[in-house]
Image: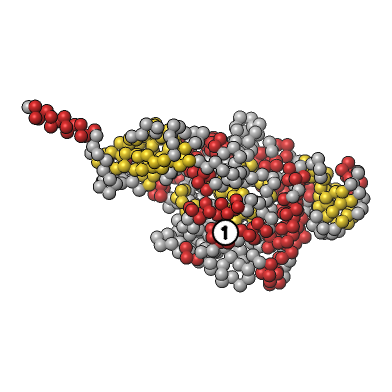
């Protein structure tokens, strides 16, 4: 009997303290742990681990380390997932072991905690001192053709198909940083670079080269490069005293995302059968009379059939997305984020996401894509807006689509009470609605819009007028890649996103070089080289003009379709004159005496010429004049 008792005691003791089995010997399998590693030193010390593997949800999780607190383990309806919450407030950088036990079996996973970066030149934010250069990676330059085709991925390169992948990559951007810097750009914004392993539909001409249908949120698309190459690109941008802005999407992912193929919970995405596709009516979110049906269509409807709509009201998903953002900021050192389709997810989630990011990175900046029809519905999304519903977005910057619409419409109109340049005047006159209009990102085109030179009717004078306006009015200017070489295209998205000439070895003309731009201009019969230099000179001047970057603005009603405003600070005054007419004008400046009194002349920035007489200005058709005033 004593022998039997000893045997039983040893057996039960062994059940509780069995030696860890190696991963190779265990029948427990883990395919993913996301994030792969984390950092100590965050304001919020608790974080989530998503653990994925066959029946991993049936395992018991433990941590044998006193400075790591296992807060909770959440099992969900899909047994292939576990959500593990850890508190590392007292932990030091290093590794610790997570144990997964099931039916007498154990798998031990070693997890790393890194120390947060504490140096300079990272997470800097961006502001009105910057000019942003927007790049679609697939269409800019192919620096490494060896990764055009990746075994196992669903699409390779086919430059003959406008909607297919063309092979641009991170190395192509790195190879041309000199070009971007010499153009006067101070920040680079990349359309999404995360893995988009989605199939190209030749019959429907549906492709995902644009990057907005992620299939892995912790991985750079291998056809662009690696995570490490992305981080190196950010570092090289910083070495040039430039900033880096990463494009993110939390409204949707692609149908081939790994967790869409095996959903953790039934409410991880919204039910397309119930809500269909979105009505794109984002005004329903702040409309006091909006019906529940219209609101649900906006927020819960899918953007397109190939992009499942994420349900951020699921707290596990919300934590996952917020952590993914913090991971990329800390890992890569990016300076800002442009959040795609910002109004489409639940606004309460977007506010908490913004708050958490800025809590951890106070110098960071975020611009939300708020494609709204007017100033009030755009201003609603900027932090500090006094909305009747009490909403606080925590979002510093918004995309200024109302100003875009005003500019691109005004350049085609005759002047009137509210048309032509007065359309711009009236739009900017509503800036009292923005808590901080200097934070607005302003533009004349981007990857979703017709190319500006096409919008002008291929009129170079109108082109210069629009560019001059966004370079001198309030806000943060953004230039879309190729705008500086008069790229054209409108209608289908692929036409707005044509390859940059010279980005591929086989291209006959290389517009990254001065000789190539001259040749391209001769080939097209357009002033391509002149347009490039026009933007370069204006941008470089703006980079050295605090009065234009952060100064005050006073504008005058556009009389005879000539719009005049002044940008000024304690040291400098800049006079901007925009002739919105298709013919010359002589401008009597006596109306502007409140600013011109005391100034004898100035220097016209675009031409470089000295202006000796400010009483009267001669303006050509659609001519902009930018005058630095001298006493």
Q: What element carries label 1?
A: helix
* x 67%, y 58%: residue: 182
Indicate the quadrant where residue 557 lies. top right
Kindly tell me whether residue 268 is visible in this rendering.
no
Left/right placement of residue 127 relative to residue 97 reads: right
Q: Looking at the image, which is closer to me, 468 or 254?
A: 468
List x then y, in percent, for residue 448. 60, 54
Q: Can you say whether 84 is above or below 224 in the image?
A: above
**Quadrant of the drawing holding the N terminus:** top left
* x 82%, y 45%: residue: 573
**Residue holding disc 1:** 174
Kindly tell me whether residue 2 is visible in this rendering.
yes
Left/right placement of residue 57 relative to residue 213 reads: left
Q: Which colour scheme is used?
A: secondary structure
Indicate the quadrant where residue 556 lies. top right
Q: How crowded is mark 1: few (under 14 residues within 10 Å), some or many (20 or more)?
A: many
Q: Can you say whether 500 is above or below 310 in the image?
A: below
Q: How many labels does the image show?
A: 1
List x then y, in percent, for residue 279. 55, 45
Left/right placement of residue 549 relative to residue 288 reads: right
Q: Looking at the image, which is closer to me, 180 or 424?
A: 180
Left/right placement of residue 274 relative to residue 3 reads: right
List x then y, in percent, for residue 335. 59, 46
* x 79%, y 45%: residue: 567
List x then y, in percent, for residue 458. 72, 63
């Amino acid at each position: 009997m004593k022998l039997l008792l000893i045997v039983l005691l040893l057996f039960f003791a062994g059940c509780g303290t069995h030696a860890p089995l190696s991963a190779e010997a265990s029948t427990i399998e883990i395919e993913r742990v996301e994030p792969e590693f984390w950092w100590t030193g965050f304001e919020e010390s608790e974080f989530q681990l998503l653990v994925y593997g066959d029946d991993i949800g049936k395992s018991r999780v433990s941590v044998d380390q006193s400075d790591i607190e296992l807060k909770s383990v959440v099992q969900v309806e899909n047994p292939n997932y576990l959500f593990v919450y850890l508190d590392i407030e007292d932990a030091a950088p290093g590794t610790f072991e997570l144990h997964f036990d099931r039916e007498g079996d154990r798998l031990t996973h070693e997890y790393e905690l890194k120390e947060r970066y504490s140096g300079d030149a990272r997470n800097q934010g961006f502001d009105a001192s910057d000019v942003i250069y927007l790049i679609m990676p697939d269409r800019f330059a192919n620096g490494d053709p060896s990764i055009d085709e990746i075994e196992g991925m669903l699409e390779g390169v086919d430059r003959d198909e406008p909607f297919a992948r063309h092979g641009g990559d991170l190395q192509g951007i790195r190879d041309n940083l000199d070009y971007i810097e010499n153009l006067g750009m101070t920040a680079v914004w990349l359309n999404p670079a995360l893995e988009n392993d989605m199939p190209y539909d030749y019959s429907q001409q549906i492709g995902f080269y644009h990057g907005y249908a992620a299939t892995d949120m912790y991985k750079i698309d291998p056809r662009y490069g690696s995570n490490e190459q992305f981080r190196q690109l950010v570092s090289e941008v910083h070495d040039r005293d430039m900033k880096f802005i990463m494009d993110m999407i939390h409204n949707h992912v692609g149908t081939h995302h790994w967790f869409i193929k095996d959903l953790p919970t039934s409410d991880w995405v919204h039910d397309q059968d119930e809500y269909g596709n979105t009505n794109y009516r984002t005004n329903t979110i702040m409309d006091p009379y909006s019906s529940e049906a219209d609101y649900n269509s906006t927020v819960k409807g899918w953007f397109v059939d190939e992009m499942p709509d994420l349900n951020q009201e699921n707290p596990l998903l919300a934590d996952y997305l917020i952590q993914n953002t913090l991971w990329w900021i800390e890992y890569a050192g990016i300076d800002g984020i442009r959040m795609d389709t910002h109004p489409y997810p639940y606004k309460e989630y977007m506010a908490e996401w913004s708050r958490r990011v800025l809590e951890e990175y106070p110098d960071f900046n975020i611009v939300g894509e708020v494609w709204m029809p007017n100033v009030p519905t755009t201003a609603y999304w900027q932090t500090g807006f006094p909305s009747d519903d009490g909403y606080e977005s925590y979002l510093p910057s918004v995309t200024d689509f109302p100003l875009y619409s005003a500019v691109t419409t005004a350049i085609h109109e005759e002047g009137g009470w509210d048309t032509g340049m007065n359309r711009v005047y009236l739009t900017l006159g509503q800036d009292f609605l923005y808590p901080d209009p200097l934070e607005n990102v302003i533009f004349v085109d981007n990857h979703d819009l017709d190319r500006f030179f096409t919008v002008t009717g291929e009129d170079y004078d109108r082109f210069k007028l629009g560019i001059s306006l966004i370079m001198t009015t309030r806000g943060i200017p953004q230039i879309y890649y190729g705008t500086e070489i008069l790229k054209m295209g409108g209608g289908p998205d692929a036409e707005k996103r044509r390859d940059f000439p010279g980005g591929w070895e086989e291209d006959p003309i290389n517009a990254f070089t001065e000789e190539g731009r001259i040749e391209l201009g001769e080939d097209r019969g357009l002033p391509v080289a002149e347009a490039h230099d026009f933007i370069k000179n204006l941008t470089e001047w703006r980079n050295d003009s605090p009065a234009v970057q952060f100064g005050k603005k006073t504008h005058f009603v556009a009389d005879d379709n000539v719009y005049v405003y002044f940008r000024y600070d304690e040291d400098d005054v800049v006079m901007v004159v925009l002739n919105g007419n298709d013919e010359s004008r002589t401008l009597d400046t006596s109306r502007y005496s409140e600013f011109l009194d005391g100034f004898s002349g100035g220097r016209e920035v675009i031409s470089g010429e000295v202006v000796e007489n400010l009483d009267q200005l001669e303006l050509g058709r659609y001519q902009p004049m930018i005058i630095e005033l001298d006493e």
